[in-house]
Image (cartoon, rainbow, N blue to C red):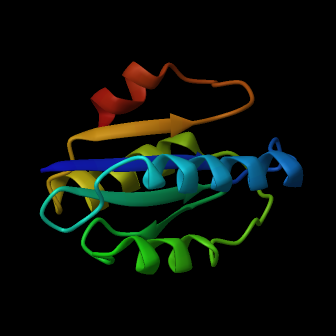
Amino acid sequence: MLDIGFLINDSSDVQYGSWIKLIDFIRDFERQITFSKFKTRIGVVSFGDNATTQIKLSNYHTREEFEAAIKHIKYIPQGQNVFAGLKAAYIDLFKVEGGKLIIFCFTGILYRKVGDVIKSL
């Protein structure tokens, strides 16, 4: 089994058109894999001022369920709290649900090194 988490930037640095492309990328990615609770699961965490686990790895077991869920992720431009996003992805998708791979979709400038943020988790 392969569990994949997408950590997506929901900050005001991301323009609405880019946000749509990001959601389309996740959907296109999902369509290229064997998606099921026994093969590959996908989770999504978004971050701005805070982080929100939009889709847990265990939430959806069919492609249709996942695609319906991803349509409901809202674009809410906010600040950019990378630490909150990494922490939520680590705790909600990896520590609790055993995820194995995270794809970090980010724009803008990091004010802390990602390695330093991960060490603080």
Q: Is residue 21 left or right of residue 103?
A: right
- In the displayed structure, 54 sits above or below 114; it is below
Residue 53: give x, y in percent of width and height: 44, 67
Q: Identify which residue is drawn at 44% across, 37% down.
A: 103
Q: Identify which residue is drawn at 75% across, 29% down.
A: 108
Q: Is residue 108 left or right of residue 55?
A: right
Q: Front-most of 104 and 95?
A: 104
Q: Is residue 37 left or right of residue 35?
A: left
Q: Identify which residue is drawn at 42% across, 70% down.
A: 55
- In the displayed structure, 83 sits above or below 38; it is above
Q: Is residue 104 left or right of residue 60?
A: right
- In the displayed structure, 15 sits above or below 106; it is below
Residue 87: give x, y in percent of width and height: 38, 49
Which quarter of the rendering shows the C terminus?
top left
Q: Judge whether residue 48 can be spotted in this image.
A: no
Q: Quadrant of residue 43?
A: bottom left
Q: Front-most of 89 and 100?
A: 100
Q: Judge whether residue 114 can be spotted in this image.
A: yes
Residue 77: give x, y in percent of width and height: 80, 59
The number of callouts visible is 0
Q: Identify which residue is drawn at 82% across, 41% down.
A: 13
- In the displayed structure, 74 sits above or below 86; it is below
